[in-house]
Amino acid sequence: MNLQALKTPRGCLTSIFIVLVVVGLFAVGVLRKEAELPVISLAAEEIPLPFSLPFYGNHIPNTLPSTFLTMAILILIGLAYNRAQRQEGPPSRFRVAVEAVAEGMLDFMENAVGENARIFFPLVATFFLFIAVSNWCGILPGFGSVGVLAPHHAEETAIAEHEVEHEEEAVAEHGEGEEHVEMELVPFFRSANAHLSTTLALAIVSVAAA
């Protein structure tokens, strides 16, 4: 960066303008008391079911369908590559693309690990592909936008003032004698990596495999 440009009148005015904008945005965020604070949740939303499932009951986390979708995509890619590998003649573009990705990951691991790269390659490559495909699925249309309406359950970690304000607004709008049930959209799909249990499961598998 050329520091001489900052010493010119135009550079000084630009720097002052940027500083004022940053300070102004910070002041607006601090002084805006009526802004609702976001509720931070590590747990996935629960999808209500019309029937009961073992270990889950009548609710399942919406990261579970995303996990099975990610696994299905990886399994289909593996089956398609196995079929392409058995075909005679010149390799197809799909086979070349898969082998290029695998060789690239293996070369990267050999540069980082050395001779033991082929030992850890299956585990590391599986983790990488699972996390990558799961994140890519999270940007597909329908993720986070298509779901069912379910009663909203306040998070235990929500700020008390935030809950009190909602209760006061509900009483003022619906009256004291009416019970206000707030509905929220529970999406069918949510990225599997958004759930803390996925990270914990990958950590347990990596430690057990090592």
Image (spheres, rainbow, N blue to C red):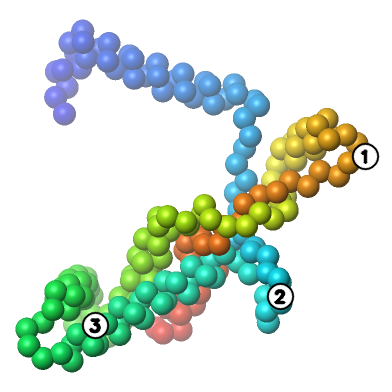
Rounded to the nearest whole Å, what is the CA distance between mark 2 and mark 1? Answer: 33 Å
Percent position (x, y) of residue 35?
62, 30
The amino acid marked with disc number 1 is Gly
- Alpha carbon distance from label 3 to label 2: 38 Å
Image point (75%, 37%), residue name: 166
Mark 1 Cα within 10 Å, few/some/many (few <14, many 20+)?
few
In the rendered image, the vertical position of residue 199 relative to residue 120, given as above or below: above
How crowded pointer 2 is (Cα within 10 Å; few <14, some 14-19, many 20+) is rated as few
Query: Which residue carries the number 3 mark?
Result: 81
Residue placed most toward the observer, 79 or 34 = 79
N-terminal-most mark, 3 or 2: 2
Where is residue 17 drawn, in percent x and y? 33, 15
Q: Is residue 18 above or below residue 169?
A: above
Three-letter amino acid code at the position of disc 2: Phe
Instruction: List the residue tagged with mark 1.
Output: 177
Helix, strand or loop at mark 2: strand
* Relative height, residue 19 to residue 61 (above, below): above
Number of the label disc, if any, that sits on residue 51: 2
